[in-house]
């Protein structure tokens, strides 16, 4: 056989592309060794995981303590403001506007009529062969719902997951962190309760409108339950807001 | 002698890849596996053509490499976007190509 003879021949000419590819092959072969070497330099996974869990628990405790302190300090500030305003002639008007701005800023707890929307993933209902991602609640879903509720005239919104409730304010963030959803830097997992204060009928109709924000979720077996409530009580925003660069604009500027 | 040149170049590539800071994590693991298989398939294809005495090997090998990367890469990308598990199917032609090339090196 001519081909068999030629493939075993000792004298052949190497093409340029083979030479170049041999270098690339070497580079590709080095990558697993490089990754293994880098992994060995890191601390053992079990140790690092345990350390991280301990650190996370400690930081969560510290965070809870600081939240309590912040809440106490805010109460003191509110009391002081009230006592200062009590001695002024325009106190009632000032007090009212200050209360309104504090509610708008999410600094005070607030109550009023509204709705509770419960979102929960239905376990074990993913059809065989289908990807699981559409059957999970993502940050986009929460953002779309929150946008829709604001648009429907909600005056205050909060999201609850298990024992944590986060009030949404102008600087609130909702984003995916791995398999969790981070609301105001608090890790949350489904089911979610979204509380909104506003006209319950308008809020409900905004959410249940055909082709609205809830329809795609229901299509993927995500349970959505809306309950109209005569009184919803929302906690204040638990974080800290900074104002470093933004300055008020004076009259005539 | 010429096989030694190949060996030296592979080692040179290995050292370069090991000591240079190549940002491999920019690619996902699926695309990294695709790149590895496409390169090893094209390399063995080119080498088998060289050894069997065929000339002007640059163009066929480059075409094989480019087509392998494009077609398999598109299948993987499409699978990811449509959430279909097409990853193994995309890599199969390259793996089969590599196996066929290796078969050519076997003593007859």
Image (spheres, coloured by chain):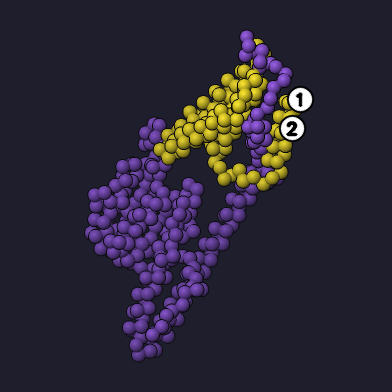
Q: Residue furthest top?
A: A1
Q: Is residue A208 above or below residue A12?
A: below
Q: Nearer the viewer, mark 1 or mark 2?
A: 1
For mark 1, what is the residue? B1
- Asked if the residues shown at circle 1 and circle 2 are in contact, with their CB atoms under 8 angstroms apart, the answer is no
Q: Image quadrant of residue A45?
A: top right
| Quarter that holds the N terminus of chain B | top right
Q: Which residue does the image show at 50% across and 48% down from the upper left? A: A178
Q: Which residue lies furthest to the right in this view?
A: B1
Q: Image quadrant of residue A220?
A: top left
- The answer to which of A92 and B24 lies nearer the viewer is B24
Circle 1 sits in a helix, a strand or a loop, which is it? loop
Q: Colour of chain A?
A: purple
Label 2 packing within 10 angstroms: few (<14), some (14-19), many (20+): some
Q: Which residue does the image show at 57% across and 54% down from the upper left? A: A56
Q: Which residue does the image show at 67% across and 42% down from the upper left? A: A39
- Please indicate whether residue A44 sits to the left or right of residue B72 in the image: right
For mark 2, what is the residue? B8
- The answer to which of A238 and A221 lies nearer the viewer is A221
Q: Position of residue A214 (x, y in %)?
A: 30, 49
Q: In this view, does B28 lie above or below A108?
A: above
Q: Colour of chain B?
A: yellow
Work out whether residue A164 can be spotted: no
Q: How far apart are the two marked residues, 1 and 2, measured between alpha carbons?
A: 11 Å
- The answer to which of B22 and A234 lies nearer the viewer is B22
Work out whether residue B24 can be spotted: yes
Q: Which residue does the image show at 34% across and 88% down from the upper left? A: A90
- Return the chain for callout 2: B
Q: Is residue B39 above or below residue B24?
A: above
């Amino acid at each position: 056989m001519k081909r068999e003879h030629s493939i075993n021949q000792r004298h052949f000419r190497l093409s340029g592309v083979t030479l170049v590819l041999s270098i690339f092959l070497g580079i590709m072969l080095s990558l697993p060794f490089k990754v293994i070497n880098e992994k060995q330099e890191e601390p053992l996974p079990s140790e690092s995981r345990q350390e991280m869990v301990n650190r996370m628990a400690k930081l969560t405790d510290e965070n809870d303590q600081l939240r309590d302190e912040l809440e106490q300090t805010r109460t003191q500030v509110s009391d002081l403001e009230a006592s200062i305003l009590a001695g002024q002639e325009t106190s009632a008007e000032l007090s009212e506007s200050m209360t309104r701005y504090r509610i708008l800023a999410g600094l005070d707890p607030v109550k009023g009529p509204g709705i509770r929307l419960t979102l929960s993933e239905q376990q074990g209902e993913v059809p065989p062969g289908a990807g699981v991602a559409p059957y999970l609640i993502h940050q986009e879903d929460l953002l779309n719902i929150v946008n829709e509720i604001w648009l429907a005239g909600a005056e205050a919104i909060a999201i609850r997951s298990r024992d944590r409730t986060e009030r949404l304010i102008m600087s609130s963030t909702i984003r995916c962190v791995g398999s969790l959803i981070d609301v105001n830097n608090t890790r949350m997992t489904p089911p979610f309760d979204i509380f909104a204060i506003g006209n319950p009928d308008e809020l409900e109709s905004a959410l249940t409108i055909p082709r609205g924000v809830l329809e795609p979720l229901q299509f993927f077996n995500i349970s959505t339950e809306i309950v109209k409530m005569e009184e919803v009580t929302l906690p204040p925003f638990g974080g800290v807001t900074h104002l470093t660069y933004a300055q008020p604009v004076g009259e005539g500027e | 002698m010429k096989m030694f040149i190949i060996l030296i170049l592979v080692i040179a590539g290995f050292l370069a890849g090991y000591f240079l800071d190549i940002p491999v994590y920019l690619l996902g693991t699926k695309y990294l596996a695709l790149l590895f298989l496409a390169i090893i398939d094209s390399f063995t294809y080119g080498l088998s053509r060289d050894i069997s005495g065929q000339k002007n090997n640059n163009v066929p090998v480059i075409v094989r490499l480019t087509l392998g990367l494009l077609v398999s890469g598109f299948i993987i990308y499409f699978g990811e976007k449509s959430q279909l598990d097409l990853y193994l199917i995309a890599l199969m032609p390259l793996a089969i190509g590599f196996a066929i090339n290796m078969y050519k090196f076997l003593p007859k």
